[in-house]
Amino acid sequence: MKIAVLPGDGIGPEIIAEAVKVLNALNLDLQMETAPVGGAGYEASGHPLPPATLKLAQEADAILFGAVGDWKYDTLDRPLRPEQAILGLRKALGLFANFRPAICYKELTHASSLKPELVAGLDILIIRELTGDIYFGQPRGRREAPDGHFPGSEEAFDTMRYSRPEIERIAHVAFQAAQKRDKRVTSVDKSNVLETFQLWKDVVTEVAKQYPDVALDHMYVDNAAMQLVKEPKRFDVVVTGNMFGDILSDEASMLTGSIGMLPSASLNDKKQGLYEPSHGSAPDIAGKGIANPLATILSAAMMLRFSLGQEAAALKIEAAVQQVLADGLRTADIYSEGTTKVSTAQMGDAVVKALASV
Ligand SMILES: NC(=O)C1=CN([C@@H]2O[C@H](COP(=O)(O)OP(=O)(O)OC[C@H]3O[C@@H](n4cnc5c(N)ncnc54)[C@H](O)[C@@H]3O)[C@@H](O)[C@H]2O)C=CC1
Ligand SMILES: CC(C)CC(=O)C(=O)O
Ligand SMILES: [Mg+2]
């Protein structure tokens, strides 16, 4: 089993080191090879996604990814910015289905941004379409405005677009995931305003007919953002587009205690996957040894489950994470009075230790 390990920038190398530590402790036959990506790729070879890194990723069974980006690259032309590396990998590998489970561990109900009773037992699965929408739509650019409110002035534009097959395949992913859960899908759109999301709603409604055992409802994204903090347990599977899913999953992370708790899996139709925390490179805390590595460790568990056929090992990691939380260990982002504050590395060590007892 070959894993491409791409730590990236900011806290990326710190959290990946802990996930690798946990994977090594499982004594599986894992071949891990590390390569630079993002700002680190740019520094090493002048490009955020060096050809050798892309090749390694393409040839691997799975990719374990940290995070990319740093404010210092904001002045670079867009194709050279670190974030293009993760967008490029998603596109090149066809990783269209992004799973972001927002689970509130019972030990963290008091760390949540919401009242404990609103999040106790919370288990939402956000399924975000990952290779379409306004993040990838062409044309895009800057130009002298030909029309609009200020003709002749400089304007910038991006294109939101989805094709029927793109919506169909992510809808199937969502309905099939719901069949294994509470059999409810909420499709989040903005069909009252956007043509793109009118098509989205039409297609999801059509696909739903093939899944009569799953209940479908539709919700506008603005209402969904509100309902997530009002009554989050009303959701089971949420399926939505790339940009709405990006924003709603960051929001949902705070229901679980921290963005440092939200793992993700990005899959293509061959079950090859890229596994990364849902957060970014957190330059504000990089190098301080305080980042929460649990989202990355839980992403490694998802990798074992989805791409490497190692369900027992995945369950073991998840149980070990639960154990360290039950033992009261907390990184700064989830710390509360009466618990023990630990560093990034101490948290990784604790998960490794817990593996022996779960
Ligand atoms: N997949 C990726 O590689 C992503 C990259 N980015 C990039 O990351 C850089 C920073 O972006 P931000 O908007 O600040 O988002 P961010 O997710 O990196 O950080 C947002 C806030 O959450 C905190 N945070 C994030 N991860 C944490 C962890 N594991 N433990 C504790 N606290 C954590 C940060 O300290 C910060 O206060 C940018 O360059 C952005 O483009 C952003 C999102 C995803
Ligand atoms: C470069 C961004 C699109 C990454 C991001 O924010 C995400 O995938 O959550
Ligand atoms: Mg994001």
Image (spheres, grey):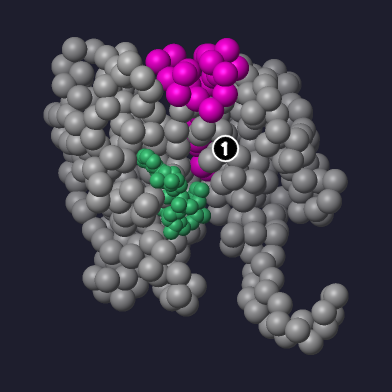
Residue closest to the eye, 86 or 349: 349
What residue sits right under mark 1 in the picture? 251
Q: Which residues are magenta?
A: 97-123
Left or right of 191 in this view: 125: left
Residue closest to the eye, 266 or 8: 8
Left or right of 191 in this view: 65: left
Q: Is residue 115 magenta?
A: yes
Q: Position of residue 122 (x, y in %)?
A: 54, 19
Q: Position of residue 160 (x, y in %)?
A: 70, 60
Q: Position of residue 231 (x, y in %)?
A: 67, 22
Q: Is residue 45 magenta?
A: no
Vertical position of residue 49 compared to residue 264: above or below: below
Residue under the point 23% across and 13% down: 358
Residue 316 appears in the picture as rendered: no
Left or right of 20 in this view: 12: right
Toward the front, the furthest residue is: 337
Which quarter of the rendered picture does the N terminus lie within?
top left
Residue under the point 77% across and 46% down: 190
Badge 1 local density, few (<14 within 10 Å), some, or many (20+)?
A: some
Vertical position of residue 165 compared to residue 41: above or below: above
